[in-house]
Image (spheres, rainbow, N blue to C red):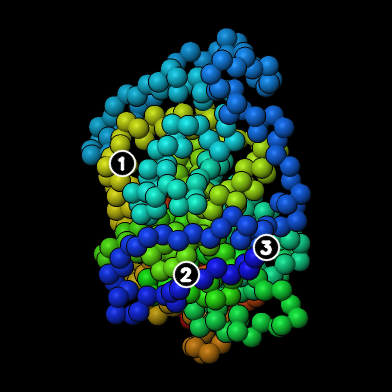
């Protein structure tokens, strides 16, 4: 059958209706659609002969001699208690106890996709946040952080030497993954509104007929690392339209979704929008608890079409078996105690915390680097992406690497030159700075030191 499934719609809303999206019956792509997208290694992977039979252990009346699970009687953990801040009042703490059944599941090998209570909670979260209902051809898996899921997704969808579409600049953490597959990373221009759909359209319209088109586009649509940009609704709809026209999947890496602090309502995710603008099934979504609960707990989750999740799970079953079920039991206990309203109250508190951090950093930017740098104000995440004005010639592209890696560090300030976020390693005047940790005095001092370095480079006195 054809790999292009038409729903009888154009795949993009008329501009006069873009702000009032209405849901309708959801049409989803069939399972065999994804055969053309899976990598050779994903197709060659076989299900685990043991883990694939785990669900059968729950069959009434069956005595299992299946798995080499350690006997729980030998585990030293008997109970687990921890304190947590109240979402409604972070100045107050409450004590939580992991339920004995949940702890038992958390101490033992679990299903590859996660422990049952956490999976159920996360399914409900995705339904509430992204207006996606169960039975629409999607599911989710818990992973060892979203980076784990991204790595496995790329392995499942990309063959060595493939061309892939990436934002320019792009999250540096995916560059080595694509490089290890010797991929051609096709850089799509971005600006303060997200992916430049004109750039993307031009790339695809002018793609050589003798060469296989890219099967995936990687994007960070909220508080992008490194640029801090948040993609507008119009841009997202245009990208979705192009994904249908040119038959590629969207890898929606969204660790800063809950760190949105803009004044306007949060823009719907690609995962939401695809059901409201045409046939669903082209979005593979990555979420993380690292930025809102704990980075070290290493719990994230990937949501998307069943066949793609199956490929990711088969990788997990042969690589690390599962995300830590012990960590999952802790996360579930916390989320279950909070409830969905409590969870959203907590994420709102976190986002407002970072909004204050952003305001402090931007005030210092104006104070110290006014006239010496240019930037857009981020509305999510924890990064500023600013261009150093190293000369009076606005047409001249400076080299931030030469400044940041040596002179700025020698001057007592550390940041990332923009070149590390460009797959081709091109020269750029941009710098990425994180505002997540430092207090006002440290921010001001860091940018004061950077100001001295820039002025010296420009041949001016401080």
Within 10 Å of the Cα at label 1, are there few (<14), some (14-19), or many (20+) other Cα atoms?
some
**Residue sitting at x 69%, y 29%:** 50
Which image quarter holds the N terminus?
A: bottom right
* Residue 443 sits above or below residue 109 on the image: below
**Residue sitting at x 39%, y 50%:** 133
Tell me the distance, in whole angstroms, between the alpha carbons under discs 3 and 2.
Answer: 19 Å
Residue 48 shows in the view: yes
* Image coordinates for residue 145, horizontal then vertical, percent: 54, 44
* Image coordinates for residue 57, horizontal then vertical, percent: 59, 22
Q: Secondary structure at mark 2?
A: loop
* Image coordinates for residue 74, horizontal then vertical, percent: 60, 10
Camera-side residue of 29 and 275: 29
Contact flag, marks 3 and 1 (Cβ < 8 Å): no
Q: Which mark is residue 72?
A: none
* Image coordinates for residue 389, horizontal then vertical, percent: 49, 80
Q: Which residue is mark 2?
A: 7
Of badges 3 and 1, nearer the viewer stands 3
Of badges 3 and 2, nearer the viewer stands 2
Q: Residue furthest top?
A: 73
Tell me the distance, in whole angstroms, between the alpha carbons under discs 3 and 1.
Answer: 38 Å
**Residue sitting at x 40%, y 80%:** 371
Contact flag, marks 3 and 2 (Cβ < 8 Å): no
Q: Which residue is mark 1?
A: 340
Q: Which mark is residue 36?
A: 3
């Amino acid at each position: 059958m054809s790999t292009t499934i038409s729903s009888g719609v154009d795949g993009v809303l008329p501009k006069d209706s873009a702000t009032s999206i209405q849901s309708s019956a959801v049409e989803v792509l069939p399972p065999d659609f994804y055969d053309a997208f899976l990598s050779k290694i994903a197709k060659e992977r076989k299900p685990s002969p043991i883990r694939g039979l785990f669900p059968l252990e729950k069959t009434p009346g069956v005595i299992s001699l299946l798995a080499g699970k350690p006997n729980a009687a030998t585990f030293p953990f008997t109970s687990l208690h921890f304190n947590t801040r109240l979402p409604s009042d972070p100045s107050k703490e409450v004590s939580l106890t992991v339920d004995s059944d949940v702890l038992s599941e958390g101490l033992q090998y679990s299903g590859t996709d996660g422990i049952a209570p956490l999976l159920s909670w996360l399914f409900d979260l995705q339904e509430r946040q992204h207006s996606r209902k169960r039975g629409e051809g999607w599911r989710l898996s818990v992973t060892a952080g979203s980076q784990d899921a991204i790595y496995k997704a790329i392995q499942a969808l990309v063959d060595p030497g493939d061309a892939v579409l990436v934002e320019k600049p792009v999250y540096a953490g995916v560059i080595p993954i694509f490089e290890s597959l010797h991929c051609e990373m096709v850089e799509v221009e971005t600006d303060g509104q997200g992916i430049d759909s004109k750039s993307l359209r031009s790339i695809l319209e002018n793609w050589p007929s003798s060469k296989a088109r890219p099967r995936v586009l990687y994007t960070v649509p909220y508080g992008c690392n490194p640029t801090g940009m948040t993609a507008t609704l119009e841009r997202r709809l245009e990208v979705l339209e192009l994904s249908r026209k040119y038959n590629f999947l969207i890898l929606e890496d969204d660790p800063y979704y809950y760190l949105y602090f803009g004044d306007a309502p949060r823009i719907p995710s690609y995962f939401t929008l695809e059901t409201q603008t045409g046939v669903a099934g082209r979005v593979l979504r990555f979420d993380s608890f690292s930025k809102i609960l704990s980075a070290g707990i290493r719990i994230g989750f990937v949501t998307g079409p069943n066949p793609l999740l199956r490929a990711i799970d088969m990788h997990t079953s042969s690589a690390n078996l599962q995300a830590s079920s012990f960590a999952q039991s802790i996360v579930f206990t916390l989320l279950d105690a909070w409830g969905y309203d409590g969870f959203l109250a907590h994420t709102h508190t976190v986002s407002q915390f970072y909004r204050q951090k952003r305001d402090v950093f931007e005030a210092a930017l104006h104070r110290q680097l006014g006239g010496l740098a240019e930037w857009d104000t981020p509305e999510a995440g924890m990064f500023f992406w600013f261009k150093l004005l190293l000369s009076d010639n606005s047409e001249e592209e400076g080299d931030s690497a030469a400044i940041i890696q040596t002179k700025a560090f020698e001057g007592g300030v550390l940041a990332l030159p923009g070149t590390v976020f460009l797959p081709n390693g091109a020269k750029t005047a941009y710098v990425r700075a994180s505002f997540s940790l430092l207090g006002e005095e440290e921010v001001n001092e860091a940018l004061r030191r950077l100001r001295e370095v820039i002025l010296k480079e420009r041949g001016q006195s401080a």
